[in-house]
Amino acid sequence: MAQYDVIIIGSGPGGYVCAIRCAQLGLKTAVVEGRETLGGTCLNVGCIPSKAMLHATHSLHEAEHNFAKMGLKGKSPSVDWKQMLAYKDDVIGQNTKGIEFLFKKNKVDWIKGWGSIPEAGKVKVGDDTHNAKHIIIASGSDSANVPGAEVEIDEKVIVTSTGALELASIPKTMVVVGGGVIGLELGSVYARLGTDVTVIEYLDAITPGQDAEVAKQFQRLLQKQGLKFITGAGVSKVEAKGGKATVNYALRKNDSQHELKADTVLVATGRKPHTEGLGLDGLGIKMTKRGQIAVDDGYATSVEGIYAIGDVIEGPMLAHKAEDEGMALAEILAGQAGHVNYDVIPGVIYTHPEVASVGMTEEQLKEEGRDYKVGKFSFMGNGRAKANFAGDGFVKMLADAKTDRILGCHVIGPMAGDLIHEVCVAMEFGAAAEDLARTCHAHPTYSEAMREAALACGDGAIHA
């Protein structure tokens, strides 16, 4: 067997990015992947297919609600569900084949099969054992079940995000357990397709950890789109019988018991690290209390020569966080100074409107006792947004009261997931809100709303 500098277990965003960077830096690299295609959960059954479905159903929404206002007359389009799923599958195929091409281009070997680590320096795949100076665990995560509840997921009636992306037909009713990113994105998809969607969230507000003002506005806008919400409710049981599902839940404020019936139940209560079958117990690799792999600042585990990145270690379970860690670790192994700034990792929810955030929330700043100022600007004051029926939402900029340094930004509105990155760049360079406010922004663009929020941190926005 070939001697590798690096073997990476898992070809998701963390694994494949790490592999390509390792190869670019002159390290002989292989990736172990047991799926038929590369790309991990993200490209196969996560980020990419869900965005395809969000795009398709948003286009349907535009045709049904906004085309006539612009003088585009005609029958509303009908939904060919099989064709929509085929479109989604084609998008997956284009992306996964793209990773395969990049592996060949960069001379990264794909070792096909599921890997385990019998000892440091060795990776076993099937009957073969491969040697490597460095082994990187980038095995990602799995959908988590409802904590403390009786739920048997069959991926037909009671589904995770994987099953929700390939339902045999569009359900008339759906219950989503969990008011986080996955549940709200896929709930939006089906609500646009005509499904009666009810979201049950254990906490008193959706999108836990999000800026409270944004979360409140977000829920209001989703309700206008037809989604229903039951917050402060704990699910105790989900049962499938005769092709239908029953959800039992209790309201936490008074412990009253309730029942909901639906064609489909989507369990979207988060994700858990995927470490089964890797042989970590036998290696004595130290784990955290939450079942993650413990690593140091250089992503090294407690066993020399073995590293971990992405969803299997602490931090937000985000594809781009895993990618950054993959690049940083590759650079460290090549003798460079790899680094990830965990204070500047954006989060995005790809509904319509989109929600994006980076840095600290107002609640966190209050908890720290930090002296800060707020600059807000509504998209109703943005000419481009009004022209495109996208005036819902706002930008909220948070800056240090004394230094004016940007501490965080929270956006709910059109293209929020793209707009947030000018703030990310600004924060990486320690910019003040005034720096962003004095930067010329093209007109008319959505990005002017970012500048206006920065101006609002000073003498005031122009169009407010």
Image (cartoon, rainbow, N blue to C red):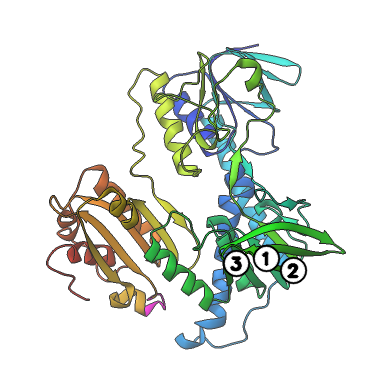
Image position of 285 (left or right of 163): left
- x, y percent for residue 319: 50, 43
Compute the Cα span from label 3 to label 1.
22 Å
Q: In this view, does 13 lie above or below 443?
A: above
Image position of 282 (left or right of 352): right
Q: Earlier in the sequence, mark 2 or mark 1?
A: 1
Compute the Cα span from label 2 to label 1.
6 Å
Pointer 3: residues within 10 angstroms few (<14), some, or many (20+)? few
Pointer 2: residues within 10 angstroms few (<14), some, or many (20+)? many
Compute the Cα span from label 2 to label 3.
24 Å
Q: Label 2: which residue?
A: 262
Asked whether the viewer can see residue 228, the reply is: yes
Report the residue at 49% width, 44% height from top: 318
Image position of 168 (left or right of 251): right
Residue 175: mark in rendering: 1
Of 261 and 309, nearer the camera is 261
Query: Mark 2 and 1 residues: CB-CB less than 8 Å, in contact?
Result: yes
User: In the image, what residue type sits under mark 3?
Assistant: Asn
Asked whether the viewer can see residue 96, the reply is: no
Which numbered mark, 2 or 3, is in the foreground of this view?
A: 3
Q: For numbered disc 2, what is the local secondary structure?
A: strand
Q: For numbered disc 1, what is the local secondary structure?
A: strand
Q: In this view, does 169 lie above or below 295?
A: below
Q: For numbered disc 3, what is the local secondary structure?
A: loop
User: In the image, what residue type sits under mark 2?
Assistant: Ala
Residue range (magenta):
387-391
Residue 254: mark in rendering: 3
